[in-house]
Image (cartoon, rainbow, N blue to C red):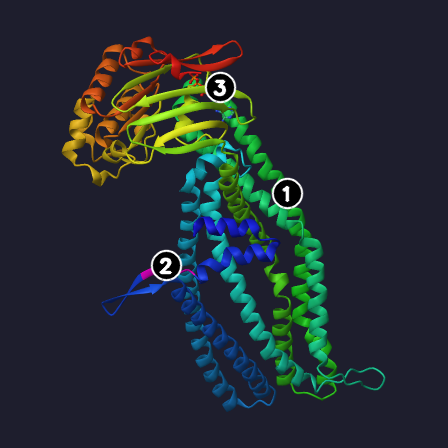
């Protein structure tokens, strides 16, 4: 479903096609949700709920237009009563007004409430589509690896999904309601125009005269707005992007607070933040300039609109052709028709922002879809499904993204239950070989045979500690509910972290609260809980003293005797904890694997 959306957006050409591909799936979504009515629960399609809510809002809007029509008629009666000094009718009409106003207020309040309810449902759905797509097939990783040019996915998922759903509904509903208004009031204005004669050449009568004036007036305003305001679309796009970049810089500082503090990097960060904000500042200036130009037009247009119908219709009034009530009704109807025809002008700012949001969301989907397509096409490795007990590399070349060779012609067999250590100079490609085994690295060729079943755990030098309680951190990537508190305590004890056991239920900023060595031992504790069939350790004991390192490896091997243990290490001490040693060292201009125990296995 998710990938489908991205693929469809990728194929869609043109703004409207992209808009439709982005909008349609929710309104036809097959997902079912439970709703509870009078204590009974029903499973209903999300799309049916969405359509029903939309219909309800439309019905309220049509009701609102009908009330405006009643108000227009009331306007005529009310001002005629004033002109005729008819006090009883005046008070009667005021009571009538109070009823219309009350109904109108109740309808508006509920229309807004239901619209908000629909917006948050749609936003929840779309946001889930985006974060599912971002998390699936490791897109979040590949987008960064491929340097896809997609900036700040988190902003697109959080802010753009919000803006898209809210603005689409607001614009659509206001557009539809303006169409209803336009039809209703065009008829009124057309009929009222019948009484108006243009005082030239002895008086000319043009059917629907005021209606034509409104069309010309609104057409002129729309054309001017479009001409002047067009650059605002691009400017809004940039403003959102620069805002997200600025926020991201600060997030990086927070995430690396300790390093920045130790380096005393505040000066550099400050100038980075300044220069990042200066882009926002400069772009905002541009936005101000165009908004000012646009405001000249829209303000003049709006001001003129309030007196314009009086000016055009006044000759009829002064000539005694129409009453004061008809004049005010004509002005009201003209204002409403012209207001509907000027929808584009009023909505221009929002439309510009909306176009930018659609562009950002669709380009994000494009990038995800492309990553998935390209990854499949570019991945030169032949991946074969093997038994749980063996991992094999046959004639594997690992390249850099630019195609330069990193490891060439490597063949090796890793067996479950055995410990293998990979060593080699810094930059020789050890971590990249791990990435290849994890299916993250697409650049290269050769046959990689991996088990399809079983559990695999990678322990990097700096383990990832998610936000949450210590138990959550410890159990990751399992759920904290998958392991009992007693198991977690035992895992902590086994990895010399017993002092943390009382804090299992505590939520803290764990990357800050734990030392590097403690974080690495959390990795080992995880392995004990996760019980993988294969464990890959990438310098996972670099921060540990030799004794602790030995204890960790011994515990790991004793507690998980069936697991294949594959380590990358620079420290010579680690070699002794493994049965085999593979050296990834440069030989002439190439880097190749030498399997010490099975020299024939290496090319
Ligand atoms: N995403 C990437 N894009 C471009 N080059 C990369 C990327 N990742 C790694 N490299 C390059 O690949 C080479 C091997 O990196 P790798 O991390 O595999 O080395 P390593 O042997 O694990 O090094 P170390 O022992 O220092 O950790 C390095 O020259 C590195 O710059």
Quadrant of residue 36 in the image? Answer: bottom left
Say whether marks 2 and 1 touch (CB < 8 Å). no
Q: Closer to us: mark 3 or mark 1?
A: 3
The residue stretch that appears in magenta: 29-33
| Disc 1 within 8 angstroms of ligand 1 (CB) | no
- Asked if ligand 1 lies within 8 A of label 2, the reply is no
Which label was assigned to residue 285?
1
Q: Count residues near mark 2 (Cα–Cα under 10 Å), then give few for <14, some for 14-19, many for 20+.
A: few
In this rendering, position of residue 219 left or right of residue 579: right
Q: Nearer the viewer, residue 598 or 282?
A: 598
Placement of 541 over or under 106, stated as above or below: above
Q: Earlier in the sequence, mark 2 or mark 1?
A: 2
Residue 5 among magenta residues: no
C-alpha distance separating marks 2 and 3: 48 Å
- Along the viewing direction, whichever of 107 and 467 lies nearer the viewer: 467
Determine the secondary structure under disc 1.
helix
Neighbour tally class for label 3: few under 14, some 14-19, many 20 plus, Cα within 10 Å: some
Residue of label 2:
31
Q: Which mark is residue 428?
A: none
Relative to 132, 35 lies left or right: left
* Dots 2, 3 in contact, CB < 8 A: no
Pointer 3 or 1: first along the chain: 1
Q: Which of the marked residues, 2 or 3, is nearer the chain's N terminus?
A: 2
Query: Is 124 placed left or right of 491 in the picture?
Result: right
**Residue of label 3:** 408
For the question of whether residue 256 can be seen, the reply is: no
């Amino acid at each position: 479903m998710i990938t489908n959306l991205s693929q469809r957006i990728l194929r869609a050409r043109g703004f409207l096609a992209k808009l439709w591909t982005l909008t349609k799936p929710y309104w036809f979504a097959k997902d079912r949700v439970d709703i509870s009515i009078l204590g009974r629960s029903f499973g209903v399609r999300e799309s049916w709920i969405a359509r029903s809510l939309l219909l309800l809002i439309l019905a309220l809007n049509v009701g609102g237009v009908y009330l405006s029509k009643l108000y227009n008629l009331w306007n005529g009666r009310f001002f005629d009563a004033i002109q005729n000094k008819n006090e009883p009718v005046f008070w009667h009409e005021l009571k009538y007004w109070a009823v219309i106003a009350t109904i109108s207020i109740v309808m508006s309040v509920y229309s807004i409430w239901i619209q908000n309810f629909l917006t948050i449902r749609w936003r929840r759905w779309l946001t889930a589509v985006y974060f599912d797509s971002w998390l699936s097939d490791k897109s979040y990783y590949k987008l960064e690896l491929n340097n896809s040019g997609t900036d700040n996915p988190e902003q697109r998922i959080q802010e753009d999904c919000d803006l898209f759903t809210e603005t689409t509904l607001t614009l659509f509903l206001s557009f539809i309601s303006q169409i209803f208004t336009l039809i209703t009031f065009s008829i009124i204005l057309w009929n009222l125009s019948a009484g108006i004669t243009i005082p030239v050449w002895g008086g000319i009568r043009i059917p629907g005269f005021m209606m034509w004036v409104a069309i010309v007036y609104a057409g002129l305003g729309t054309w001017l707005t479009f001409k002047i305001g067009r650059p605002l679309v691009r400017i809004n796009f940039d403003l959102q992007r620069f805002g997200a970049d600025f926020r991201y810089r600060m997030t990086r500082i927070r995430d690396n607070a300790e390093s920045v503090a130790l380096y005393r990097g505040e000066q550099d960060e400050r100038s980075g933040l300044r220069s990042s904000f200066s882009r926002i500042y400069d772009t905002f200036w541009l936005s101000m300039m165009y908004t000012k130009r646009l405001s000249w037009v829209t303000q003049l247009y709006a001001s003129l609109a309030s007196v314009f119908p009086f000016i055009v219709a006044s000759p009829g009034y002064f000539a005694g052709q129409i009453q004061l009530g008809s004049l005010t009704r004509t002005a009201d109807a003209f204002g409403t028709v012209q207001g509907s025809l000027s929808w584009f002008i009023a909505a221009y700012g929002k439309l510009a922002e909306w176009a930018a949001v659609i562009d950002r969301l669709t380009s994000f989907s494009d990038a995800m879809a492309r990553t998935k397509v390209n990854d499949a096409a570019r991945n030169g490795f032949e991946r074969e499904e093997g038994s749980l007990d063996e991992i094999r590399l046959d004639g594997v070349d690992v390249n850099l993204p630019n195609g330069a060779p990193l490891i060439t012609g490597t063949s090796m067999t890793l067996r479950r239950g055995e410990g293998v250590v990979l060593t080699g100079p810094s930059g020789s490609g050890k971590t990249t070989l791990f990435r290849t085994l994890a299916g993250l690295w697409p650049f290269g060729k050769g046959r990689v045979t991996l088990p399809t079943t079983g559990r695999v755990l990678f322990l990097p030098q700096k383990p990832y500690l998610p936000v949450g309680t210590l138990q959550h951190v410890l159990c990751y990537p399992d759920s904290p509910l998958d392991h009992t508190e007693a198991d977690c305590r035992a895992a902590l004890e086994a990895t010399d972290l017993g002092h943390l056991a009382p804090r299992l239920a505590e939520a803290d900023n764990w990357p800050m609260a734990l030392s590097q060595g403690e974080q690495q031992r959390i990795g080992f504790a995880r392995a004990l809980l996760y019980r993988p069939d294969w464990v890959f350790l990438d310098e996972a004991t670099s921060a540990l003293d030799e004794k602790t390192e030995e204890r960790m490896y011994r515990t790991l091997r004793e507690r998980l005797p069936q697991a294949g243990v594959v380590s990358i290490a620079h420290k010579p001490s680690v070699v002794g904890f493994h049965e085999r040693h593979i050296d990834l060292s440069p030989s002439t201009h190439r880097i190749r694997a030498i399997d010490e125990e099975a020299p024939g296995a290496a090319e």
